[in-house]
Amino acid sequence: MALLFTMFFFSCSRSPDALTLIPPPTNPMEREYIGYGVVDASFVYILEDPLQDNSSLGYLRRRSLVKIMERQPVSIKGTVESWVKVEAPYAGTPDGEIEGWLKESSLTVYDNEDQAETAAKAMTP
């Protein structure tokens, strides 16, 4: 019996290296944003609310860089789509920024601004 217990105990134990957890470089819960995105489509309308029939606040062109602040699933006609609330530079506003909603499918999402800027520069106009 003692032999079975010893075999069981040693077969279940792990080396200390296997139990070491390494935290990510930046804790996502500490950030005030989700990530950055680059617009893939020729242009997209930025909306006040995440609904297709809502009024447009303006539009963003392909290669536009946005900061993603929030993600929300929305059911439209039985289909669930992911929408993101974004902040983006926009010349048509007094403070030079626009905040609104885009379909997440119109963006490629990146973890940080440097990655997004690199991807935007590499896209064809």
Image (cartoon, rainbow, N blue to C red):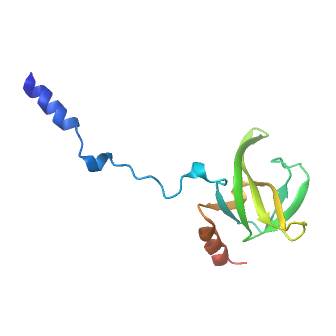
Left or right, 69 with reference to 1? right
Residue 121 coordinates in the image, percent (x, y): 66, 77
Q: Nearer the viewer, residue 19 or 102?
A: 19
The residue under the point 86% across, 51% down is 48
Left or right, 57 with reference to 88? right
Q: Nearer the viewer, residue 2 or 109?
A: 2
Residue 40 coordinates in the image, percent (x, y): 71, 66
In the picture shown, does residue 4 fall above or below 54?
A: above
In the picture shown, does residue 20 fall above or below 123?
A: above
Task: Find the residue positioned furthest to the front.
Answer: 30
Residue 26 coordinates in the image, percent (x, y): 53, 57
How many numbered markers are drawn? 0
Q: Quadrant of the C terminus?
A: bottom right
Q: In which quarter of the image is the N terminus?
A: top left
The residue under the point 81% across, 57% down is 99
The residue under the point 11% across, 27% down is 4
User: Residue 13 sits in which quadrant?
Assistant: top left
Left or right, 56 with reference to 60? right
The residue under the point 14% across, 26% down is 5
Residue 35 coordinates in the image, percent (x, y): 64, 58
